[in-house]
């Protein structure tokens, strides 16, 4: 399915997977609404995409863990874009520690951003897709949403929840020609991973944001009659 002249909104677009996805979609001629908490990151990306690929790019700063900010951002971008064909729920935060060591506030912040933020954004965007009887939603989960690990209770809980939310939503909206997909990458060489102390290793052997972005584009290019429910992407030969 051709993506030229489609529209997409991406959360967490200032860095990492979100930024790579914006670039990959712009290369396909997709007009973009980009969201993040940092205005500087968004402005830099907006200028680059507009000059490099000639697509329309609109940006809004918002903290998706805040319901009002998430809704206002989606409605603002939808008005500028005219429609929402693709939504990529990528924004997320991470922090690791044992259940007893991690502060309750930090635990709640991860759930509020990774799960509730995905819910807030999706709930705001969904009426536009239902009205046009078409759309595509990609939720970025993680291998941490498929198996737990020590010190990762909050992050794993949030990503497990994203998978459950994705599957339930898929059953609700598929009759309206809306395709809902969850992606479960293993550790990606991003600023988020480095900030929480994950081992990045040799960049030639480490998964890059661009790798995940290619998968996002590929899943959106399938014929409208089919969709990928869940797709994992792993590093071939990790250190």
Image (cartoon, rainbow, N blue to C red):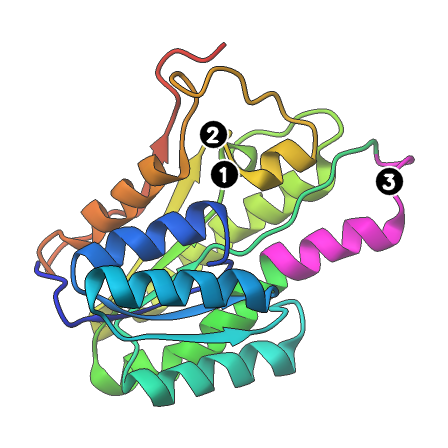
Is the residue 55 above or below the residue 188 in the image?
below
Real-space Cα distance between discs 2 and 1?
Answer: 6 Å
Query: Is disc 2 placed on a helix, strand or loop?
Result: loop
Real-space Cα distance between discs 3 and 2?
Answer: 23 Å
Mark 1 or mark 3, earlier in chain: 3
Mark number displayed over residue 186: 2
Residues marked 2 and 1 touching at CB (< 8 Å): yes
Front residue of this view, candidates 226 and 18: 18
Q: Would residue 100 appear left or right of 51 to someone viewing this image?
A: right
Per the rendered image, the range of residues in magenta is 99-114
Whether residue 136 is visible, yes or no, is no
Query: Is disc 3 placed on a helix, strand or loop?
Result: loop
Q: Residues within 10 Å of mark 3 (few under 14, many from 20)?
A: some
Can you tell which quarter of the image residue 4 is in?
bottom left
**What percent of the width, then of the height, locates residue 77?**
41, 81
**What percent of the width, then of the height, locates residue 99?**
84, 36
**What percent of the width, then of the height, locates residue 19?**
42, 52
Is the residue 11 above or below the residue 212 in the image?
below
Real-space Cα distance between discs 1 and 3?
Answer: 21 Å
Q: What residue is disc 3 on?
A: 102
Q: Determine if the magenta segment contains residue 123.
A: no
Front residue of this view, candidates 61 and 226: 61
Circle count:
3
Q: Tell me the chief SS of the magenta region.
A: helix
Mark 2 or mark 1, earlier in chain: 1
Mark 3 or mark 2, earlier in chain: 3
Whether residue 114 is visible, yes or no, is yes
Q: Residues within 10 Å of mark 2 (few under 14, many from 20)?
A: some
Q: Residue at x 83, y 31 (%)?
A: 98
Residues marked 1 and 3 touching at CB (< 8 Å): no
Q: What residue is disc 1 on?
A: 142
Q: Residues within 10 Å of mark 1 (few under 14, many from 20)?
A: many
């Amino acid at each position: 399915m051709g993506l030229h002249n489609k529209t997409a909104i991406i959360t967490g677009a200032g860095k990492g997977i979100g930024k790579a996805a914006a670039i990959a979609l712009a290369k396909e001629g997709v007009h973009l609404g980009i969201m993040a908490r940092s205005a500087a990151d968004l402005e830099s990306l907006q200028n680059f995409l507009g000059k490099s690929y000639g697509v329309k790019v609109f940006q809004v700063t918002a903290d998706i863990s805040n319901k009002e900010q998430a809704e206002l951002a989606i409605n603002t971008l939808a008005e500028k874009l005219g429609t929402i064909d693709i939504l990529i729920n990528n924004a997320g935060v991470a922090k690791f520690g044992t259940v007893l060591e991690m502060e309750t506030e930090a635990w709640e912040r991860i759930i509020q951003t990774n799960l509730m933020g995905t819910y807030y954004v999706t709930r705001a965007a969904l009426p536009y897709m239902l009205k046009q009887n078409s759309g595509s939603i990609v939720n970025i989960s993680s291998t941490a949403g498929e198996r737990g690990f020590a010190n990762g209770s909050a992050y794993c809980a949030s990503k497990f929840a994203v998978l459950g939310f994705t599957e339930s939503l898929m059953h609700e909206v598929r009759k309206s020609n809306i395709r809902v997909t969850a992606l479960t990458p293993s550790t990606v060489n991003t600023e988020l991973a480095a900030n929480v102390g994950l081992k990045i290793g040799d960049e030639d052997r480490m998964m890059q944001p661009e790798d995940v972005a290619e998968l996002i584009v590929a899943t959106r290019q399938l014929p409208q009659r089919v969709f990928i429910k869940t797709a994992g992407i792993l590093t071939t030969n990790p250190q």
